[in-house]
């Protein structure tokens, strides 16, 4: 099972202690700027899982997402 963990600057996707991917972000006021999305295993949808969690977390905490990362930009356009 993939576990998502949010820190003050990253969202980490892990499975059995192994890092599968991460999102790096900054928080300023109510803005969450997504800088980079990394998926270390291709074909598993890790980037999509990370972005889904990022959107959920941002909504729960009333953050507006500013997507700098191209993957985040594409993901957000797809779910609009």
Image: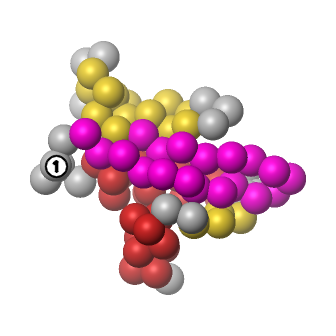
Task: Give the residue at x 28% y 34%.
Answer: 20
Say whether residue 33 is magenta: yes
Determine the residue located farthest toward the right in the rendered image.
29
**Residue corresponding to mark 1:** 42
- The dominant secondary structure in magenta is strand
54 w.r.t. 9: above or below: below
Q: Is residue 61 visible?
A: yes
Q: Which residues are magenta?
A: 22-40
Residue 50 is left or right of residue 64, and the answer is left
Q: How is the image coloured?
A: secondary structure
**Where's residue 42, x and y in %?**
16, 49
Residue 7 is left or right of residue 4, and the answer is right
Report which quarter residue 8 is drawn in: top right
42 w.r.t. 21: above or below: below
Q: 10 Å neighbourhood of mark 1: few (<14), some, or many (≥20)?
A: few
Q: Is residue 2 visible?
A: no
């Amino acid at each position: 099972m993939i576990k998502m963990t949010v820190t003050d600057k990253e969202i980490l996707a892990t499975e059995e202690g192994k890092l599968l991917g991460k999102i790096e972000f900054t928080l300023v006021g109510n803005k969450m700027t997504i800088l980079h999305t990394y998926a270390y295993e291709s074909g598993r949808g890790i980037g999509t899982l990370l972005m889904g969690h990022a959107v959920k977390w941002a909504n729960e905490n009333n953050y507006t997402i500013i997507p700098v990362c191209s993957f985040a930009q594409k993901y957000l356009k797809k779910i609009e």
